[in-house]
Amino acid sequence: MFKRLLGLAPKLEADGSYSPSRVALWMATSAKTDFEKISYPKYQGKQSKILVIFTEQKNMTMQNGKMFSTGNHPVESLVPMLHLKNAGFDFEIATLTGKPVVFEMWAFPNKDENVQAIYKAYKSSFEQPKKLQAFVDHSLTDSASYAAVFVPGGHGAMLGIPEDKNVGKILRWAQEEGLFTITLCHGPSSLLATTLDNQKFLYDGYKMAVFPDSVDKQTPMIGYLPGHMPWGLSEKLKHLGATIVNTKSDDTVCLDRKLITGASPLASDKLGKLAANTLLKELS
């Protein structure tokens, strides 16, 4: 009751999950993003496609059994896509089984016209995405058409994606074919899929920016999460040999070889710029 009065209690949703409290939303979300519209030289080559792997799962079970209402963070998804689209790239939208993309709509920047526009432009693809198995079956032989694989953040990226063998196959294909991998916040959980079937971690020795476990441990105090996380992402990546370059949930971005990463939603704009400029430079 005390937390509810102070606005610190997570909000109970109709399906029994919890979205962030009023205070957490005030602290961690905004009606507009810091997206900076840039006039990039448009990419005109054949490698114009970017595969975007979204989660189709909504609810994450915390250590206390409560479910967090999650999915893909809209800012972490759509702001990098805005930069890449403005640079001349287009997207193939996919989920693990072809079920609709799930967004954390409580974090959607409703007063941001640019984000609204790209969301509407790809809405039909979000509702009817490609099945990842179909991509593996039909597109891995078409690497000449692709520039990158993008895995957006949001806690939902930790659901299913790290355990999916097709994700591991796609990330290995991307590295073997010289494509870029772009991800941020909790999206780097996808990199764990490269360890399935006792394979060596593909990114051992890489530097990367990732959402810190230390921050995830603090957010239940303000009602962002309804409990403590089921497992820690940054610690798991460090244990596998990754070097985490950030200690805060800030706007840190990192480029190491062909892996482009960002630390948090605050890094979305910088990540989009870094990805767009890097791909244009590499592919021109």
Image: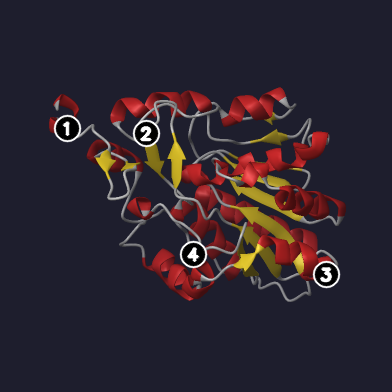
- Corner quadrant of residue 226: top left
Residues packed near mark 4 inside 10 Å, few (<14), some (14 to 19) or many (20 plus): few
Q: Amino acid at mark 3?
A: Asp
Q: Amino acid at mark 4?
A: Lys
Q: Is residue 27 above or below residue 119?
A: above
- Residue beneath label 2, please? 66
How far, Cα to Cα, is label 1 from label 4? 39 Å
Mark 1 vs mark 4, foreground winner is: 1
Q: Secondary structure at mark 4?
A: loop
Mark 4 vs mark 3, foreground winner is: 3
Q: Secondary structure at mark 2?
A: loop
- The residue shown at (65%, 42%) is 162
- Residue beneath label 3, please? 142
- Residue beneath label 1, please? 4
Q: Nearer the viewer, residue 35 or 3?
A: 3
Q: Amino acid at mark 1?
A: Arg
How far, Cα to Cα, is label 4 from label 2? 40 Å
- Residue beneath label 4, please? 37
The circle on residue 209 is none
Q: Are marks 1 and 3 in contact (CB under 8 Å)?
A: no
Quadrant into which the N terminus falls: top left
The answer to whether residue 154 of the structure is visible from this angle is no
Marked residue nearer the N-terminal end (2 or 1): 1
Marked residue nearer the N-terminal end (1 or 4): 1
How far, Cα to Cα, is label 4 from label 3? 31 Å
